[in-house]
Amino acid sequence: MLFFSKKKIKTDSKVDKKTQPKRGDLAVTSKTKRQSTKIKKKTQTTNSGSVVSKKVPQKSTQKDKILKHATGLAYLSLTRPIITEKAMVLQEQGVYTFEVPINANKIMIKKAIKELYGFMPVRVNIIKSKGKRKRYGKSMGITKKRKKALVYLKKGEKIEFSKK
């Protein structure tokens, strides 16, 4: 609120240089505030008194190492493959049908297929179906919404589903 105040603040002209913070000290305090970033800036003062800043990469944690080896979030993008008579006919033409979450989009599905099966899809179509009204005893209910993805692969590429 110093900007709007009418009172002037007196400053002492005789201030020890030892009590004032150095340029390097200010950078160190700002570094502690930004510890969430992956790359930290490390400041050093040279013999001539100039401040030099270097980018130092942060050490990877155990959690980061686990995420690198995992398949990522691909298993969240594909709920399950749909295996019906109609889907089997489409599989002969190179079109595979998957049930996907409601919030999944085409880009997420393409990346998930690439990570899990190793094939890059040519295109992805999405079919959204509303929940149907159904009677449960005396009360009426609604079945859940569904979203299907039709994944088109190149000729010669096949995804095999194992039966459990």
Image (cartoon, rainbow, N blue to C red):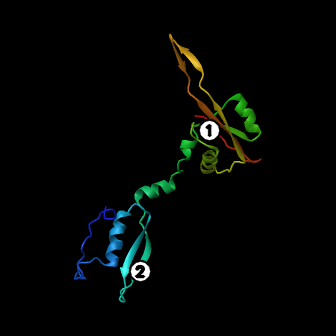
As drawn, the label of residue 24 is none
**Foreground residue, 28 or 145?**
28
Element carrying mark 2: strand
Residue 164, horizontal then vertical, whole percent = 57, 34
Nearest to N terminus: mark 2 or mark 1: 2
- The CA span between labels 2 and 1 is 59 Å
**Foreground residue, 104 or 89?**
104
In this picture, is 131 found above or below 106? above
In the image, what residue occupies the spot 62% across and 45% down? 109
Q: Which residue is mark 2?
A: 52
Q: Which residue is mark 1?
A: 162
Q: Which amino acid does the dot numbered 1 rest on?
A: Ser
Mark nearer the viewer, 2 or 1: 2
Local crowd size for mark 1, using a 10 Å CA cut-off: few (<14), some (14–19), many (≥20):
few
Q: Which amino acid does the dot numbered 2 rest on?
A: Val
Where residue 148 sits, quadrant-wise, is: top right
